[in-house]
Image (spheres, grey):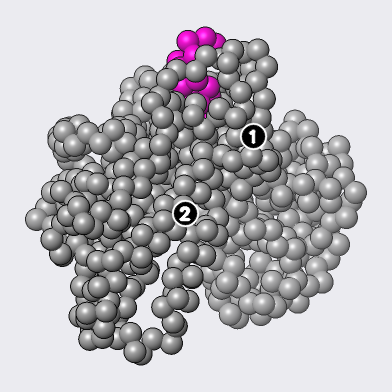
């Protein structure tokens, strides 16, 4: 017996065997079971999604010897003849090869005659949009009022080309592209029945390459079976399709998170041995970063259509949101600049190195500029005292928000700087002047936030009021640190700790973050503590709120010290200047050296 391709061998014989299209099948099954049948059905959708297959199954349902049913027996004479393509009352027409009006009139001449074998005479017209305008006109009257023994089943990949007069006479069903998940499930079942070994990763590659078409997927599967010679493996299918191995993207992301430039270049060099499309690698990385960003905002926002949800969630939890957005923007710009690179490989390498070079070490909340250009004081419509008041009010009213791990530090010594402007457009910055001596000590007074020397806390001694101190001693990083920083310690009972998370931050929280925080706590206490995190409104100050409050206090004191300093006041008086309060920033001691 000659070999039959998988797309034909595994073509569904009833609605239960169909992959997907439940929205269409439900309507047809209900119509058949209640005997509420229309005379014309139009099935639309891309190639290989099941238009003709559903039409043939519907023909069996209408003509099965046991009666009109949504579950044809498949064994009677009518079902067998339809399956074998020799049923006299199923007239299949390829409109692409019979576009002339004469062909349509010849077809319709036999409509008036009763079926010779079945219950209905079924006209299945494939690619119906290929009919000429005159052919559609010849079909219209019959399509609207056919004899009771006639059913029209039309199929097309381009319904926009059909006249509205035809569309209005049919029940239209739009078939969707099949998801990669469904295709993987369908192909894995077929391979199990065919007794062929396979790797699931290979089926995901085939499912994505098919772009929603079951027929294309099975055709590619046929090709993969021949190429792999025995076992359908991920590596072989990737080579067959010319795809980028998804593991390369995973490893590149791992290297970026680890800030390992040597590993990044090594991975690019290894990929280059297989002559890949470097632009495609960058596009795959963009897609990966995009899905990571979705997970950070909405943990359940992505499905598992690409079989990588768990890995995406792991990466999303390991990289803060600011850095992720920066990487995405750099990759987007890198793809745009790729045609201008010396070669695609160097373009990819420079894009990846640019990500590492510009990875922020931590972004402070307060402005850090020392020089400011402003209009002369005489032109200002806001008084000096009013500006000062506005700066202080903004500092006091700062609303707690999610903060990055680098900002959750409270032991940084600081001094302050600011700008005094003359009545001209030039600016005098205190950092441009000689360093203050002992006589101007008030200007450089150190603003310290004393967190005390860190000492370990025993679990038995832990109280909710000690949470901020404990938080600063935990070696948390990334999103897990941000989440913990927006929590308060709600309860301690034996070996169980309960944290209460600010409800505004609930969107970025999932159980993986809880497990990471719990693991760090177990390492800190040296015992298997259990951690729960609940969502709610905080009734005490979180580490994030503490940091913002201390920052506000620092800002208020900085404004006060700067404006009251004798040296500053002398500058204002001598140069007819004006203090620019928006430019005052508490600076670390290191900024002076």
Residue, x 25% and y 53% (percent of image)?
Answer: 441
Q: Is residue 199 left or right of residue 537?
A: left
Q: Is residue 280 left or right of residue 297?
A: left
225 or 60: nearer the eye? 225
Q: Is residue 131 left or right of residue 536?
A: left
- Quick check: 554 above or below 306? below
Report helix, strand or loop for mark 1.
Answer: strand
Residue, x 32% and y 78% (percent of image)?
Answer: 578
Residue, x 56% and y 39% (percent of image)?
Answer: 542
The stretch of residues the image draws in magenta is 512-529
Q: Mark yes or no: residue 26 visible.
A: yes
Is residue 507 a member of the stretch shown in magenta?
no
Residue 166: image location, x then y, percent: 69, 73
Q: Is residue 232 left or right of residue 239?
A: right
Q: Nearer the viewer, mark 1 or mark 2?
A: 2
Q: Earlier in the sequence, mark 1 or mark 2?
A: 1
């Amino acid at each position: 017996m000659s070999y039959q391709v998988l797309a034909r061998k595994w073509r569904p014989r009833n609605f239960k065997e169909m992959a997907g299209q439940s929205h269409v099948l439900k309507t047809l099954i209900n119509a058949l079971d209640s005997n509420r049948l229309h005379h014309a059905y139009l099935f639309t959708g891309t190639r290989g999604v099941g238009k003709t297959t559903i039409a043939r199954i519907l023909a069996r349902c209408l003509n099965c010897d046991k009666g009109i049913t949504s579950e044809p027996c498949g064994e009677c004479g009518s079902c067998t003849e339809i399956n074998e393509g020799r049923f006299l009352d199923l007239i299949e027409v390829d409109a692409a090869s019979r576009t002339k009006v004469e062909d349509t009139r010849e077809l319709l001449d036999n409509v008036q005659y009763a079926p010779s074998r079945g219950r209905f005479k079924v006209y299945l017209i494939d690619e119906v949009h290929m009919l000429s305008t005159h052919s559609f006109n010849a079909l219209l009257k019959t399509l609207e009022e056919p004899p009771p023994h006639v059913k029209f089943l039309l199929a097309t990949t381009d319904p926009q080309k059909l006249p509205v007069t035809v569309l209005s006479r049919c029940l239209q069903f739009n078939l969707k592209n099949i998801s990669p998940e469904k295709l993987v499930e369908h192909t894995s079942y077929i391979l199990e029945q065919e007794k062929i070994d396979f790797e699931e990763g290979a089926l995901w590659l085939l499912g994505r390459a098919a772009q929603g078409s079951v027929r294309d997927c099975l055709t590619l599967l046929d090709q993969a079976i021949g190429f792999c010679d025995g076992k359908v493996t991920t590596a072989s299918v990737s080579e067959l399709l010319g795809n980028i191995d998804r593991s390369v993207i995973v490893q590149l992301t791992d290297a970026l998170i680890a800030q390992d430039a040597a590993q990044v270049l090594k991975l690019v060099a290894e990929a280059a041995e297989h002559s890949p499309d470097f632009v495609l690698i960058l596009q795959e990385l963009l897609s990966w970063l995009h899905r990571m960003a979705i997970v950070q905002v909405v943990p359940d926002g992505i499905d598992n259509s690409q079989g990588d949800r768990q890995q995406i969630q792991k990466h999303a939890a390991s990289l803060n949101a600011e850095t992720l957005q920066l990487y995405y923007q750099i990759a987007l710009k890198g793809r745009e600049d790729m045609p201008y690179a010396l070669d695609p490989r160097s373009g990819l390498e420079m894009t990846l190195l640019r990500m590492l070079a510009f990875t922020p070490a931590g972004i402070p909340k307060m402005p850090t500029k020392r020089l400011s250009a402003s209009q002369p004081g005489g032109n200002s419509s806001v008084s000096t005292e009013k500006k000062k008041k506005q700066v202080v009010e903004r500092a006091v009213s700062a609303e707690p928000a999610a903060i990055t791990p680098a900002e959750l530090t409270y032991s940084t010594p600081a001094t302050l700087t600011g700008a005094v402007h003359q009545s001209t457009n030039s600016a005098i910055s205190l950092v441009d002047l000689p360093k203050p001596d002992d006589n101007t000590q008030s200007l450089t007074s150190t603003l310290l936030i004393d967190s005390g020397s860190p000492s370990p806390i025993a679990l038995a001694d832990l109280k909710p009021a000690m949470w901020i101190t404990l938080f600063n001693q935990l070696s948390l990083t990334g999103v897990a640190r941000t989440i913990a920083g927006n929590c308060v310690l709600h309860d301690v009972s034996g070996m169980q700790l309960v944290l209460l998370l600010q409800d505004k931050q609930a969107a970025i929280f999932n159980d993986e973050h809880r497990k990471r925080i719990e693991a760090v706590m177990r390492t800190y206490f040296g015992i298997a503590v259990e951690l729960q995190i609940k969502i709610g409104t905080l009734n005490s100050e979180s580490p994030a709120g503490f940091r913002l409050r201390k920052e506000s206090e620092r800002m208020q004191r900085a404004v006060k010290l700067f404006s009251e300093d004798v040296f500053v006041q002398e500058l204002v008086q001598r140069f007819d200047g004006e203090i620019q309060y928006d430019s005052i920033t508490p600076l670390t001691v290191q900024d002076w050296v």
